[in-house]
Image (cartoon, rainbow, N blue to C red):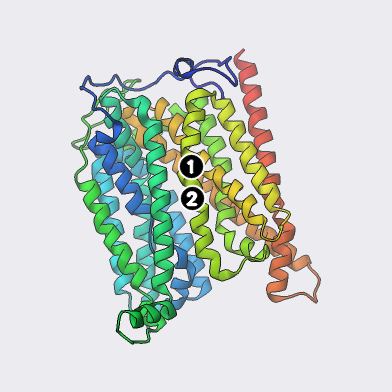
């Protein structure tokens, strides 16, 4: 499945770039013969795709995300409900939005995503304090808009950039684009993480204001919205990035489908959704890539969600958590370049096993909770997430035709969010079970730490079990084909 992009692959671990191309024939539309520019980064849509990914994803409030909600006046229970609403919105809108992108045009969906981001940030900037019920309504609208923006952007952004390259006969340059995009996003994420945490700290801002001759002591209520104002500025840049995108003209799909960029209907979107779902099921290589990506992404993203608790357990001070998040982002500068070289010079099977080895080495090392050294094992584990993101995008875009590319990528996003949600529910249940079974004389943070340490090994165990099941299913399927 994973090792057979279009026909049985007998190459395994070696081969040059030309051989890789023969193993991965592009099942996509014939490129329009346009004189290629000197570089893929000279293509307008490619530049704007990179800018969109950077401005849309790197937000100044991320390092204080949880405490921001609490300091506004929401409870922990309300915070949990709002995040559940956000996840549910993405799951419900993910695939329909991808189909709409293929029907009415990717640019329109991306403009909608940028406007939604602008509105969601404006709502938080204007959210009133002092009335818990009204405040919850403001944040509820914010979470729904945020989920719609995420769903609308998913798939459409990659599709419009990849199609622009394909129209110029430069589809083989997509790996370079992914590499540049990931590195720029990592650098910007480091900047926004540190600036966002800094402007949120009233003590630091008071010292800075005194240093410039304004001896005013700021309070938390005064710095509360500063990361939000900065992110509102990013939303304007996001809108500017997508406004100048070039919509690609409709082209016949490889299996008779056609995208209509000037309009479409709900029925057409529904039909395209079903057609794309059937195509994924009938294309073992793409199905395998999505399933393996779903396994890796769900587990690794859940571990990253729990990163602050892990840092505390390996005796790292809480004041360093923002800096640690930046350090983890540094891997995003180097890993995509390495992944590009591997994808161009090795087989998809090698890509899978190198990613699995990296993820398992990091997760198994983290399970020992070594003081301080545990940071290095976490760095290894989190690096695997960049590898997963690169490889899945690299191979799926090669195989999907232009007429359904955004829809297929939305199925990928849907699978990822379902995996993340199911793993979160399972792990929450496991934690509650262990807490109830723990000694009665333990309580509070001591109990939380003990249960977290006792259950962490389930992450590498679950990844190993999932790999065994998927590899076995792949072997059975390929045996039946032969």
Q: Are marks 1 and 2 in contact (CB under 8 Å)?
A: yes
Q: Pick the quarter of the image with the C terminus.
A: top right
Image quadrant where residue 251 sits? top left
Q: Which residue is mark 1?
A: 334
Numbered label attached to residue 174: none
Place of residue 185 in the rendered image (x, y in percent of width and height, measured from the top left): 39, 49
Left or right: where 366 falls relative to 417: right
Place of residue 302 in the rendered image (x, y in percent of width and height, measured from the top left): 57, 53
> Residue at (62%, 65%) from the top-left corner?
316
> Residue at (34%, 53%) from the top-left corner?
56
Image quadrant where residue 278 sits? top left
Residue 454 visible somewhere in the drawing = yes
Q: Residues within 10 Å of mark 2 (few under 14, many from 20)?
A: some
Q: Residues within 10 Å of mark 1 (few under 14, many from 20)?
A: some
Q: Pick the quarter of the image with the N terminus.
A: top right
Tally of numbered tags? 2
Q: Which residue is mark 2?
A: 330
Q: Secondary structure at mark 1?
A: helix
């Amino acid at each position: 499945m994973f090792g057979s992009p279009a026909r049985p692959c007998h190459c395994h671990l070696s081969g040059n770039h030309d051989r890789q191309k023969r193993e991965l024939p592009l099942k996509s539309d014939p490129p329009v013969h346009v004189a290629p520019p000197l570089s893929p980064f000279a293509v307008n849509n490619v530049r704007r795709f990179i800018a969109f990914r950077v401005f849309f994803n790197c937000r100044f409030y991320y390092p204080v995300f949880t405490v921001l909600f609490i300091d506004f006046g929401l409870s922990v229970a309300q915070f949990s409900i709002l995040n559940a609403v956000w996840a549910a919105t993405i799951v419900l809108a993910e695939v329909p939005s991808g189909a709409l992108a293929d029907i009415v045009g990717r640019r329109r969906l991306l403009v909608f995503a940028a406007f939604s981001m602008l509105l969601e940030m404006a709502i938080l900037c204007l959210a009133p304090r002092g009335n818990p019920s009204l405040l919850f309504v403001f944040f509820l609208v914010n979470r729904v808009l945020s989920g719609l923006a995420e769903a609308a952007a998913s798939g459409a952004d990659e599709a419009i950039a990849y199609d622009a390259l394909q129209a110029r006969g430069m589809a083989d340059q997509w790996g370079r684009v992914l590499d540049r995009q990931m590195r720029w996003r990592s650098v910007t994420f480091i900047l926004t993480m540190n600036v966002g945490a800094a402007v949120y700290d009233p003590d630091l801002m008071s010292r800075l204001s005194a240093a410039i001759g304004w001896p005013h002591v700021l309070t938390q209520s005064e710095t509360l919205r500063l990361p939000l104002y900065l992110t509102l500025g990013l939303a304007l840049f996001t809108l500017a990035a997508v406004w100048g995108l070039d919509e690609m003209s409709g082209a016949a799909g490889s299996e008779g489908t056609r995208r209509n960029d000037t309009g479409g209907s709900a029925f057409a979107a529904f039909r395209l959704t079903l057609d794309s779902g059937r195509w994924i099921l009938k294309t073992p290589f793409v199905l395998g890539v999505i399933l393996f990506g779903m396994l890796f992404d769900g587990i690794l993203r859940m571990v990253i969600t729990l990163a602050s608790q892990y840092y505390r357990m390996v005796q790292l001070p809480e004041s360093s958590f923002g800096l640690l998040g930046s350090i983890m982002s540094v891997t995003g500068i180097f890993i995509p370049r390495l992944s590009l070289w591997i994808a161009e010079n090795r087989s998809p099977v090698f890509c899978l096993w190198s990613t699995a080895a990296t993820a398992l080495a990091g997760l198994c090392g983290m399970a020992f909770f070594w003081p301080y050294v545990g940071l290095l094992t976490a760095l290894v584990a989190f690096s695997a997430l960049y590898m997963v993101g690169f490889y899945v995008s690299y191979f799926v875009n090669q195989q999907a035709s232009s007429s359904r590319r955004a829809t297929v990528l939305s199925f990928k996003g849907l699978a990822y969010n379902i995996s993340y949600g199911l793993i979160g529910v399972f792990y929450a249940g496991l934690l509650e079970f262990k807490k109830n079974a723990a000694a009665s004389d333990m309580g509070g943070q001591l109990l939380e730490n003990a249960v977290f340490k006792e259950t962490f090994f389930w992450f590498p165990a679950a990844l190993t079990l999932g790999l065994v099941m998927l590899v076995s299913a792949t072997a059975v399927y390929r045996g039946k084909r032969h």
